[in-house]
Image (cartoon, grey):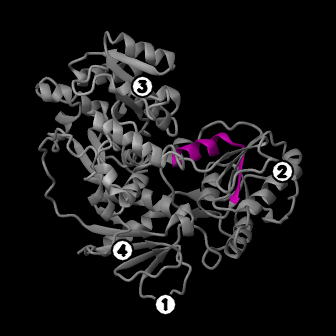
Amino acid sequence: MNGILSTPDPYALIQARLGSTRLSGKILQCIPQSSTTTLLDHIYLRLRNIFEHERIIFIIPENEIELSNFLRERNYLYFAGSLEDVRDRYIKAAEHFQIKDIIRLTGDNPFIDLTSIELLWEAMFYLKSRYYCLAMQGLPLGMGVECFSYESLIFKNEIYNEKRHTEHVSLHIKENPSENQIIKLIAPHLSPKQFQISTKIRMTVDEDLDLQLLRQVWDHLSPKNEFFGANEVLSLYDEKPDLFSLNQSVNQIKFDLPKQTEEQQMIHIQYGDPKVFGSGHFERCKSLSIEIQMKNILVECNSDFSSQYDGYIYDSREIVGKKSPALYIDFMAEKSLNSNYIYFLPHHELTDPKTENVSFYTSPLLDYYRNRVSQNGTWLVYVGSLNHEECESLDRFLIERLTSNWQIQNIHRIGGAPPSSNFEKRIKHSVRVTKIGFYRLLADSEGLVSYFGQSIMESIYLKKNTVLFGMTEVHKSLGNFFSQLAKIDYIGEPFNFQIPNGYPQKSSLVLKRDAQNQIFHWLESIKK
């Protein structure tokens, strides 16, 4: 793998204090107001979708007894340090917990964008230096985070020790781009139009008006998803722009930092709508965008094409792009266009069924979970957008036909309709999980049941027992093809499931996570 030699192993460090000058005690204010869920609770609960408990640490000033008592009552980890020198507080906490990669958050930003944290973690895999600072641009104020290394945190502190440096933890890093790798990534899960909207939105708490807005945003978005992200907030702005005028009068401190002047290649990626084409295209294009950006190439996703790009990547299965030079990923329509094609998933028209090695593409975060010990008897089921009747058919088959055959003790199903009353006590259901949450569940499981797609490849890569079923006619044909290629069981389709012979086996197929190399060869070929 390119980049730094060791696998990045970040911790989330959240600076928090009660003595805010503009809104004292704000971090223990509750959202909603009638609840007991404070700003700090929101941060912790969100981060638990990505990090283990021991990797979430609040760093607070010494002698803040009320705050330390609160954190102890919640069983949250914390470290107490200097009140005035916040940077030193970070340094001492990093040394105490032996942390090398730091994701920095603040206690007044309760609704951080989890997708951005995952993508910043991915970006760490491609760093060329241990001196770095990464951030994601295009997010509403208060929804983003930044990450940097311990080495950069302690970089020339004896020289850069003015008050602005000790108060604003990473400022000395950003003021030295020649010594540190400073990268502001373009958020691939947002469109360029949304970037413009995001500058009009404050999702941080400095004054009471901010708190009022965040409570209203919570009331609108939490019923559908309590861990809503930047995308949902920006969609809410589209619907109710007047709502966000509530706190526009609040001032924000800004610093002038060195700007990059180097001309860069600019690429557009168009991925299919996850609601129409499934989440696989969306997930891998987010990861692909980060990897390309870490090679000093600008990437915008799903724009309105008002800008001119140096190249266009289309990952939407059947949609023909209107711009060139173009590269198509897993394109399934007629190949009559004068363009290039690559496949991130095996295809029955192109893949030799006798092959033992297959290149594929996925997030580098999957490597982080390769050696995790599975929990015997636990199976993960991923069903995408199956409807109620289809989920009922699959759930019944799993519980009534396979549980005893495979000695299944626990089933966790992701996606689809909730289990019916017949099975709700036997099947744990999640409407959605984060990418890291999925990888963790998959790594902990004994096996996966899913339709042909990205999750099947990731399961085989982690050497899990893997079982296929069909959804549409396309998935049925691809599933039958891939079950033969990978030598794994195909159990049929909803309303027509069949018990396989014996216990599912791990695939003998060797997967190499290097399909992206074809992308970079193409990018080299179109350079001006």
- First in residue order: circle 3 vs circle 4: 3
Q: CA distance from mark 1 to mark 2?
A: 44 Å
In this rendered view, identify the residue nearer to me: 136 or 304.
Answer: 304
Q: Secondary structure at mark 4?
A: strand
Q: Secondary structure at mark 1?
A: loop
Is 507 positioned to the left or the right of 264 in the image? right
If you read the primary sequence from the N terminus, does the residue marked by circle 3 or circle 1 appear first?
Answer: 3
Query: Mark 3 and 1 residues: CB-CB less than 8 Å, in contact?
Result: no
Q: CA distance from mark 3 to mark 4?
A: 41 Å
Which one is closest to the eye, mark 3 or mark 2?
A: 3
Residue in the image at 54% along x and 47% along y: 223
Q: Is residue 446 magenta?
A: yes
Please rate how many residues cluster around mark 2, counting C-alpha atoms within 10 Å: few if below 14, some from 14 to 19, many from 20. Answer: few
Residue for badge 2:
503
Left or right placement of residue 158 versus residue 318 in this view = left
Q: Which residue lies at the image location 56% right of the left edge and 69% below the top edge?
A: 277
Spatial CA span between label 2 and label 4: 45 Å
Q: Please indicate, yes or no, whether residue 338 appears anywhere in the rendered image.
A: yes
* Image height of 396 relative to 425, above or below: below
Which percent across, then down, holds residue 216?
A: 40, 43
Earlier sequence position, callout 3 versus callout 2: 3
Task: Give the main secondary structure, helix, strand or loop, of the magenta stretch.
Answer: helix
Badge number at residue 312: 4
- Write down the region rendered in magenta: 435-450
SS category of the residue bearing label 3: strand
**Residue 17 lies in magenta, yes or no?**
no
Amino acid type shown at disc 2: Tyr
Q: Residue 448: image x %, image y %?
A: 70, 51
